[in-house]
Amino acid sequence: NLSQGFGIDFPEDLHDQGSAALLAGYLRGERDLLPYITRIENKHPFDLLVGNDALDDMDELLIKKGEGVSLYTLKDALDAVQFDKKYHYIVIDCKPSITILTKAAMVAANGILIPVEPKYYSEKGLNRLLSTIYDIRRQTNPRLEIYGVLPNKVDDRQRQTKEFYQLMAQCFPELPMYKGIPQSVSVSDTDAGGYMFARRSKAAIAAFDSFA
């Protein structure tokens, strides 16, 4: 979804074996991601390491007895990439569930931006995520920062949206709260129709143009 948000129609075609190779590399203890990084040339060029549904099976494979998997594997791989590429920023897009891959991303990251939907149940998920972040800080990555909470799919007309902001202020006063991203019919349409939001929305195009 992240790569498609940048207007890339079929990210899996950029490197057919990207996820499979990354998965195999994890299990073999390899660190070299450079062969699987694709350069995207447009107004604001960037590099992309493509993932796909093959990553869904990684947790089960990683926890098998005798694999000797370390949460530092992704950090080591990205450190090697950074040594070669000298990126200003590396963005790791994670699923909302807390998995071994999510924890490995926390070990590798300098900070976390937490997107949430303004729903009552989001508070429970945020509590669990914060507990995991604090564990990672204590055990493996003391420099890990929380950049803030970014409400997503916000509809200010709904009562639960106001209740959500009140709950966040009450339960998590220490967390920076960014202005929410409004719920958009265009996003729902693109999900159903299989076409790119970035190519339908003037706001998305303007946001991408300002991304540098």
Image: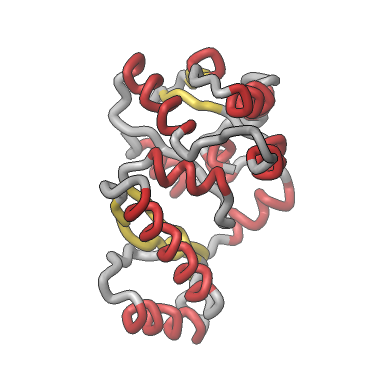
Q: Where's residue 106, x and y in %?
A: 42, 46
Q: Residue at x 60, y 25 (%)?
A: 22
Q: Quadrant of the C terminus?
A: top left
Where residue 145 appears, as percent x and y from the top left, is: 29, 52
Query: Can you tell which quarter of the image residue 10 is in?
Result: top right
- Whether residue 106 is visible here, answered yes or no, is yes
- Most extreme residue toward the front is 66
| Of residues 131 and 151, the one drawn nearer to the viewer in this rendering | 131
Q: Is residue 195 visible?
A: no
Please state if 117 lies on the left or on the right of 89 as rendered: right
Residue name at image x 33 percent, y 55 percent: 138
Which residue is nearer to you in this view: 73 or 159? 73
Q: What colour-coding does the image apply?
A: secondary structure
**Figure disc tally:** 0
Residue 9 left/right relative to 104: right
Q: Reply above or below: 80 against 148.
A: above
Q: Quadrant of the N terminus?
A: top right
Place of residue 150 in the rendered image (x, y in percent of width and height, measured from the top left): 40, 61
State the residue at coordinates (41%, 23%). 45
Near-viewer residue (147 or 100) = 100
The spot of residue 5 in percent (x, y) is 54, 41
Question: Which residue lies at the image location 57% right of the left edge and 45% below the top edge?
Answer: 197
Residue 43: image quadrant is top left
